[in-house]
Amino acid sequence: MKVFNTSQIRQCDQYTVENDEISSIELMEKAALACFEWIKSQFSANYTYYVFCGKGNNGGDGLAIARLLLEENYKVETFVIQSSSNFSTDAQINFDKYPDSVSFLENDDFEIQQENKKIVIIDALFGTGLNKPLEGNTQKIIQKLNHIKGKKISIDIPSGLFSDSLPSEDQTIFKADVTLSFQFYKRAFLHVESAQYAGKIFILDIGLNSKFIQDEETNNYIISSKSVSDNFKPRDPFSHKGNYGKVALIGGSYGKIGSISLSTRAALKIGAGIVFTIAPNCGYSILQTLAPEAMFISGGDEKLITEIKISTEKTTIGIGPGLGKEKLTKVALEELLKSIQTPAVLDADALNIISENKSMLNLIPKNSIITPHPVEFARLFGDSKDSLEQCELAREMAKKYNIIIVLKGHRTAVLTPEGKCYYNITGNAGMAKGGSGDILTGMITGLLAQGYSPQIAAQLGVYIHGKAGDYAAKKYSQEAMTAQDIIHRLPEVFLNIKK
Ligand SMILES: NC(=O)C1=CN([C@@H]2O[C@H](COP(=O)(O)OP(=O)(O)OC[C@H]3O[C@@H](n4cnc5c(N)ncnc54)[C@H](OP(=O)(O)O)[C@@H]3O)[C@@H](O)[C@H]2O)[C@@H](O)CC1
Ligand SMILES: [K+]
């Protein structure tokens, strides 16, 4: 699913009006109707709706939603911000059509009775046409709304938030519980600094022109469930284990055998044919017990990996979880990287070792997948001022080193050597716990071994990982779920993909 910037969304809007049999006011009505239907499906008529509108098309949407609510006898009070700007053409039409009186707001002296009342505040003040940070009265109005208790819904985007950039810390922005956004994810929804204002995001299809959407180029995408199903390869009934690849997961050190055992179990559970674990000898009993399906290869020493004895020709390597950074381990990693010719997966301490000796970046086989969290990424490639800048730096580094970077975070992003960014929108805060990353490494390595291209293995890996995490949260709660529960919920994910 493509992510467009504001100017592309505007062009798409225009193209639709010019090429389809729909006028801009009809498009606005369609957008408002989609919001109204959503609201109706979630809230009863017991609520009182306070609709705050600007004078642009976002306000036009708000006025149309308020009218639709009134027409079905919902209790509605509508406010329009008084400003020197005129209504946009379509907002004016919806203002003229509004069947009740509206209150014009000169400043923030409006009153909302909260006692014994269930209230919904609808924010249709500013949408994608915001042209500068809010100040003066608009700022005060939003600050006041942010203090009112009630359900808060933003139309298209929270007012005060820019679609394509991140806010500064002192910017005033409406804080929504839910954002009903039209047709496309906005980039701001995909970065933690801005996404926190949007709450839960619902993308409403308003039927913008599909040819435009198909032809218009972008470098940013969402990994959709459809693309996952399209890329998924069901198992051949006539196959044997050799058809599903040979994996070697390398890692663990004294006290961190858990990490590599989680990676091992994840690789097995995601369908890899044959799995080896290379770990220090202290991990032998643990690994053979926790993952009897996998074979153990000694990493040379009791407590750390000092040698990696595996033929890398036909084996897909995943290295890093719990590895440690001891001197002999570093040497073993360097030797391994020199010997690998095919894409591998590098995570955690493998990346930390490389960040202490940056020339090793050039040893990473091309099309390999590295899976840093933001701090590991910064150690490797330097600091960034925010997650958007870090994402752009990752795009550059993926191109420069010809690798795939899985930049983990609130919305994990997969950056490719072609400069594309694929955001993952599955997953939840219950996964922000030790062990989640080890599982992702095992999953991506297991998928790579099964013959998926590195880019697809990374995309499927992050999507499936997040989805399994969502099932785990549903069953055990975000608080109580642990990383292992992610592995346990993989069956639901596969059964659903096949559906
Ligand atoms: N995608 C689609 O196809 C569809 C999109 N639709 C909707 O259109 C929306 C975009 O509408 P839009 O372009 O009219 O801009 P919008 O956000 O209403 O803001 C413009 C107004 O805000 C004002 N203003 C701006 N910044 C300000 C500031 N800092 N402080 C104070 N004022 C400020 C600006 O005033 P000006 O500066 O021009 O005087 C002007 O009055 C989009 O988000 C979606 O909701 C749907 O209707 C149907 C299909
Ligand atoms: K809004």
Image (cartoon, rainbow, N blue to C red):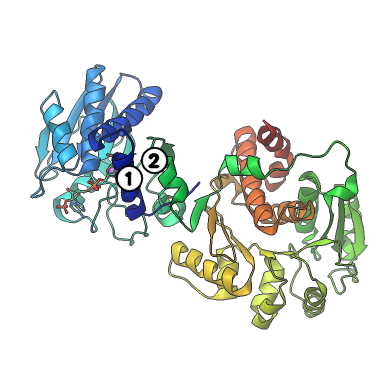
Label ID, residue 15: 1
Q: Is residue 119 left or right of residue 264?
A: left
Which residue position is annotated with label 2? 209
Amino acid residing under circle 1: Tyr
User: Helix, strand, or loop for circle 2?
Assistant: loop
Label pair 2/1, CB-CB below 8 angstroms = yes
| Image x and y of residue 253, in percent | 80, 66
Nearest the eye: 204 or 112: 204
Circle 2 residues within 10 Å: few <14, some 14–19, many ≥20: some
Q: Residue at x 66, y 65 (%)?
A: 370
Seen in the picture, residue 115 relative to 305 is either above or below; the reply is above
* Residue 180 position in % (x across, y down): 37, 37
The numbered disc on residue 156 is none
Residue 318, x across and y down, in percent: 76, 62
State left or right for residue 54 relative to residue 265: left
Residue located 25% across and 38% down the image = 24
Alpha carbon distance from label 2 to label 1: 7 Å
Q: Amino acid at mark 2?
A: Asn
Q: Compare residues 353 and 213 and report the one nearer the observer.
A: 213
Quadrant of residue 153 within the rendered picture? top left
Is residue 75 left or right of 35 when viewed as pictured? left
Q: Is the CB of mark 1 within 8 Å of ligand 1?
A: no
Q: Position of residue 59 (x, y in %)?
A: 21, 40
Observer able to see residue 291? no
Image quarter in which the C terminus is found: top right
> Nearest the camera: 238 or 110?
238
Q: Residue at x 37, y 59 (%)?
A: 166
- Category of crowding for the residue at label 1, using alpha-carbon neighbours closer than 10 angstroms: few (below 14), some (14–19), many (at least 20): some
Image-quadrant location for residue 61: top left
Q: Secondary structure at mark 1?
A: helix
Q: Please tell me which of labels 2 and 1 falls first in the chain.
A: 1
